[in-house]
């Protein structure tokens, strides 16, 4: 059994946007209930207490003026930031706690107190830009987490994997010229926010350290498994990350009302399994997830549970039939894989 931690705090439910908004407190309520079930209690071994992120930690990713803007919403019942992102009186406080919760989890994993873990926090973060709220996101939790790890643990190489159905524009832009962070994203293409073409590969010193995998609607477990095995794994083993961070969105689930993809709970477990293999090979198993999207509340709850069961190795995935499906489906996806490799092989010898 791995020592797996979770960040879990009922205050994360105090951030509320518009009535009926898909990014609702109910998302966490369902996840938390699942973790508290008797069968899960022995599997998730470490509860990690969150703290607010500091101003200095935020400023590594966001501009002072933008942080002031979000801070100015504190105590106000409602402020609209963009077409689908707003705040309530508690949102600034909770957004600090979301980023800080991830930082605390990164800290205990880097210190070796836990093998891995999942920050079950909200609001999500990967769309938040340096000076702009976007797509339900206020502060870019995972980008703040990566900068925290670079500074406090003297790391040279971090891998961020983003499997949310939407491209993490904010995370990509934060590290687009920075070779210390390799950003790998699978996402539905031609979808919000419109970024993430396969030809977006980084710039300057960061060229080659952004890997985008733009997908069509309806992609399911087998294709994700193939992409993680045939594209992500060889690149990651060559890069040798010292820590892997995951933007885990569950809006690729086949039941999600927004996503249009076809992933099941076992598909999320399979992706987790491959990430654990990479982490064991390069980063002494150091692997930290944070929650992004996912808007079918019941399906997201079951999917998070499947990821935690894999992380803790309490109920590891029996992958035999999934591997058979990946083998059977490979000819269908091979032309796409070859296109991706054609773009990336100038940067990664393992793809040649």
Image (tube, grey):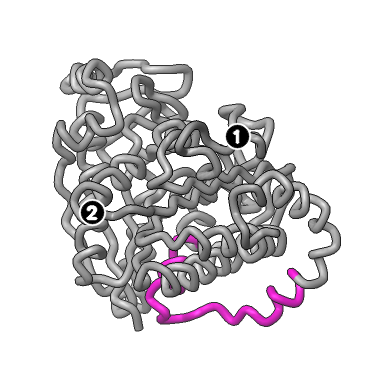
Image quarter hosting the C terminus: bottom right
On-image quarter of the N terminus: bottom left
Q: Percent x, y for residue 134?
A: 43, 25
Residue under the image location 26 percent in, 74 percent down: 45
Point out residue 346 in the picture as x, y percentages from the top left corner: 65, 48
- Rendered position, 162 above or below 16: below
Question: Toward the viewer: 56 or 137?
Answer: 56
Residue 74 falls in image quadrant: top left
The verdict on residue 324 being magenta is yes
Q: Is residue 221 visible?
A: no
First to last magenta residue range: 303-326
Instruction: Name the foreground residue: 44 vs 64.
Output: 64
Q: Picture quarter containing residue 124?
A: top left
- For mark 1, what is the residue? 200
The image position of residue 102, as x and y in percent, is 27, 50
Question: Along the horizontal axis of the image, is 12 left or right of 82?
Answer: left
How far apart, in angstroms, are the residues tagged by discs 2 and 1? 28 Å
Residue at (21%, 25%) from the top-left corner? 89
**Label 2 crowd (10 A; few <14 / some 14-19 / many >=20):** few
The residue where tag 2 is placed is 154
Closest to the observer, 327 or 80: 327
Residue 139 seen from this side: yes
2 or 1: tag closer to the N-terminus: 2
> Could you tell whether 129 is left or right of 76 in the image?
right
């Amino acid at each position: 059994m791995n020592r797996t931690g979770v960040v879990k705090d009922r205050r994360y439910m105090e951030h509320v946007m518009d009535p009926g908004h898909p990014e609702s407190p109910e998302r966490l309520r369902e996840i938390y209930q699942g973790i508290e079930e008797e069968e899960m209690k022995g599997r998730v071994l470490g509860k990690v207490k969150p703290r607010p992120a500091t101003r200095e930690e935020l400023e590594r990713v966001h501009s002072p003026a933008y942080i002031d803007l979000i801070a100015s919403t504190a105590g106000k019942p409602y402020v609209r930031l963009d077409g689908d992102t707003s705040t309530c009186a508690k949102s600034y406080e909770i957004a600090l706690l979301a980023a800080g919760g991830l930082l605390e989890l990164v800290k205990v994993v880097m210190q070796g107190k836990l093998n891995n873990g999942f920050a079950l926090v909200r609001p999500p973060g990967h769309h938040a830009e340096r000076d702009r709220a976007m797509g339900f996101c206020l502060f870019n939790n995972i980008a703040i987490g990566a900068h925290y790890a670079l500074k406090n643990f003297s790391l040279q190489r971090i891998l961020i994997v983003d499997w949310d159905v939407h491209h993490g524009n904010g995370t990509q832009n934060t590290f687009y010229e920075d070779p210390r962070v390799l950003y790998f994203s699978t996402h539905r293409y031609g979808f919000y926010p419109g970024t993430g073409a396969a030809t977006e590969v980084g710039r300057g010193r960061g060229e080659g350290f952004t890997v985008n995998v733009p997908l069509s609607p309806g992609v399911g477990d087998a294709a994700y498994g193939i992409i993680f095995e045939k594209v992500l794994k060889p690149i990651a083993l060559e890069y040798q990350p010292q820590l892997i961070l995951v933007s885990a969105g569950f809006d690729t689930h086949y039941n999600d009302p927004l996503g249009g993809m076809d992933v099941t709970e076992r598909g999320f477990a399979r992706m987790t399994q491959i990430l654990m293999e990479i982490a064991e090979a390069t980063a002494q198993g150091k692997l930290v997830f944070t929650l992004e999207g996912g808007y079918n509340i019941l399906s997201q709850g079951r999917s998070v549970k499947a990821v935690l069961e894999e992380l803790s190795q309490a109920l590891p995935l029996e992958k035999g039939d999934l591997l058979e499906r990946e083998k059977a489906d490979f000819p269908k996806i091979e032309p796409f894989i070859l296109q991706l490799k054609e773009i990336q092989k100038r940067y990664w010898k393992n793809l040649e």
